Amino acid sequence: MSQKSRANIPAQFLTNILTRGLILTALTFPYQTRGHLIGWVFANLISPIFGYRERTKKHVSQLFPKLSRQKQRKIVTNSLYNAGRTMIENYSTTDLLSHQKYAPVHGKGLTALTEATKNKRPVLLISGHFGNYEAARAALINRGFNIGGLYRNMSNPYFNSHYVQTIKALGPPVFAQTKIGLTGFVRHLKSGGPLVVLNDQHVEKGPILEFLGLPARTSTSVAKLALRYNALLIPFYGIRQTDGINFDCILEAPIQHSDPNTMTQALNDSIGARILAHPEQWFWIARRWQV
């Protein structure tokens, strides 16, 4: 362990204690109340302290320079609120599954997913850090689909231990982005099991494609997997409704197979269109445009 890593241990431990305490306290409140509480706390207290608000503000102004300051601030605040609310919803596994039992699920991709599952054809469901992707996954799990997932371990090992358990609680199988995890991921895919992947983050050494009109390095791995295993590539989204607690779950038509860059650009265009329609639902915190 490096000297820098050892120096981070006390800070990571304290951060986890505070975060875990906040989560456990919030879970004592009714489902709708806890979502509003953590959304407000994250947007107004946590984000300014850790620089998330300033970073989000920078990205929003970069993408929407013609919007008034007032409208930009509204997107920033609502985006941070959505991020906080999403986090506590995903820690409320039982409540989220119960609430999503009768959530509307529609789109051409739903028919394609149903048919592919029947024929045991591999399916990659692609989304982004938008709305609440786990709400859409929960709605599909409630309808009998064995939807697996892929996750990246958090840098804070203390937080990561309960974060991973939360992901697994929604519905197995889930796989870590490690050598062992990816082996299980591919095995599940080849067997015809649908899998969820988020594909809207910066990836070092990825090809430079367009994302919301700006150059952005993007992973083409999911497109390569789709071509290699003849898997359907279906964009899907859990779009938060105006009441804050319900979701419209949409599965778009599968991306046509061609080449990795073209297919990945189509995925970028898909999530980009959703962000432009609901900019307050994307996690602008991410450093997406690093080229």
Image: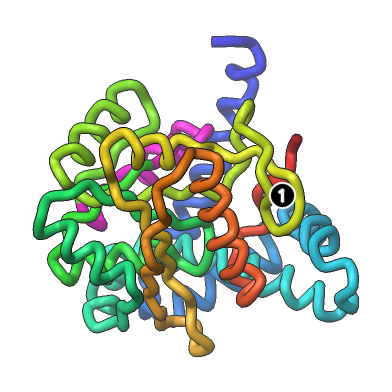
Q: Nearer the viewer, residue 133 or 106?
A: 106
- Work out which quarter of the rendered image holds the C terminus and state it: top right
Q: Position of residue 217 (x, y in %)?
A: 65, 38
Residue 253 image-quadrant placement: bottom left
Magenta run includes residue 152? yes
Q: Amino acid at mark 1?
A: Phe
Q: Position of residue 270 (x, y in %)?
A: 54, 62
Q: Which residues are magenta?
A: 151-171
Residue 162 falls left or right of residue 45? left
Can residue 166 be seen here? The reply is no
Crowding around mark 1 (Cα neighbors within 10 Å: few <14, some 14 to 19, many 20+) is few
Q: Secondary structure at mark 1?
A: helix
Residue 157 falls left or right of residue 167? right
Instruction: Please report the residue visible at 41 percent of the width from the left and 35 percent of the height from the top.
Output: 224
Residue 282 image-quadrant placement: bottom right
**Residue that sits furthest to the bottom in the current view:** 243
Q: Main secondary structure of the magenta part?
A: helix
Instruction: Please report the residue visible at 26 percent of the width from the left and 57 percent of the height from the top.
Output: 170
Instruction: Please report the residue visible at 70 percent of the width from the left and 58 percent of the height from the top.
Output: 212
Can residue 193 be seen here? The reply is yes
Q: Position of residue 205 (x, y in %)?
A: 63, 26
Which residue is the site of mark 1? 50
Magenta run includes residue 132? no
Looking at the image, is 230 positioned above or below residue 179? below
Q: Nearer the viewer, residue 18 or 172?
A: 172
Instruction: Please report the residue visible at 45 percent of the width from the left and 31 percent of the height from the top.
Output: 157
Looking at the image, is 80 positioned above or below residue 123? below
Residue 120 falls left or right of residue 291? left
Q: Nearer the viewer, residue 27 or 164?
A: 164
